[in-house]
Image (cartoon, helix red, strand yellow):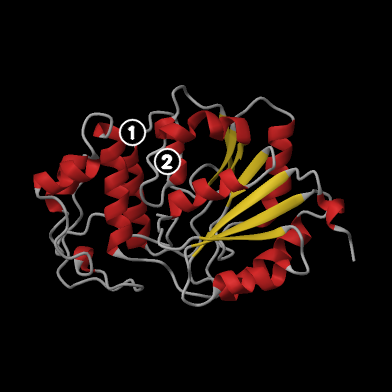
Amino acid sequence: MANASDYFPVEISIVVPTFNERENVENLIEHLERALPDVRWEVLFIDDDSPDGTADVVRALAQAKPYVRCLQRIGRRGLSRAVIEGILASSAPVIAVMDADLQHDETMLPTRLDHLRHSQIDLVVGSRYCAGGGIGGWDSRRAAMSRLATMLSRTVVTQQLTDPLGGFFMIRRETFHWIVRRLSGEGYKILLDLFASSPEPLAFIEVPYTFRERTAGASKLDAAAAWEYVLLIVDKQFGHIVPARFILRTSGAEPCSQRRLLGVEHGSHTFEDGVEDPPCGHPAQLLRHFQCASHPCLLMGDAMEY
């Protein structure tokens, strides 16, 4: 068995936020081991106290694999904040962020690392929408909602980024620390938050990938995730003046029933009948319709992906 010292200094830290992903953890680690045979790496699973015992599975695996770590958060939720805590708890000069459910292509990690090693860019972004990328088996409704959510993101991100809502990217540590104190931390869209919070335009490249189907566990689809996306957009537009939650609460835009919101039952893709086409683009239009279950504005895929 290799000694723990054989894995240091770490070249890349892979941060994986989790909630009820115990069925995927070991499989993901095996995929990473095959994808990164010549790289010194660590993987940090940032678990939001999963009821299915995800953190216990990670800790058990870490007993034999010194490059596997677990950060279990109790009493704290939210994917963006989980990623922030994970990056701050890691040690490598480069950080990759990806899902635990194997929908992101881990075989692309070495190439992305080479991009950062041999250029002056700040980050490498995996894109489903640049040439060569794809959304896999999404139906037309989910694809349309993804386009709408991307359109909404243009109100806070002006750089020509084709997939600002993706959750598969690699960033230099110094870039992250340059931005971190400006981050909103709201919701699930940490990449969008990074671009919207940066004091100067970021140097980046996009690398195409095809979004894979989940093979185990359940999608984190729920209306609360869509609500938190709107909260992030409002926070980046107005949060430096007035807190976003205050704006939405006083405007009457805060959802009265997040379970029925968008006509989505927690953990499923079931919509109410008679759904109208979603309103377009502008946050004000989105907020006006946000309380009404018969006017869905956003369709969530997995927690990180529109």
The local crowd at label 2, few if under 14, some if 14 to 19, many if 20 or more residues have their Cα within 10 Å, is: many
- At 76% across and 60% down in the image, what residue appears? 66
For residue 177, which quarter of the picture? top right
Of mark 1 and mark 2, the one earlier in the sequence is: 1
Please state which of residues 196 and 77 is positioned toward the viewer in this rendering: 77
The local crowd at label 1, few if under 14, some if 14 to 19, many if 20 or more residues have their Cα within 10 Å, is: some
**What residue type is disc 1 on?**
Val
Q: What element carries label 2?
A: helix
| Residue 122 seen in the figure | yes
Label 1 – label 2 distance at C-alpha: 8 Å
Position of residue 92 relative to residue 275, above or below, is: above
Residue 15 is situated, as x and y percent measured from the top left of the image, at 59, 52
Position of residue 204 relative to residue 44, above or below, is: above
Residue 242 is situated, as x and y percent measured from the top left of the image, at 21, 34
Residue at the far front in the pictured view: 74
- Identify residue for label 1: 156
- Image quadrant in which the N terminus is located: bottom right
Tell whether label 2 touches label 1 (CB within 8 Å).
Answer: yes
- Identify residue for label 2: 192
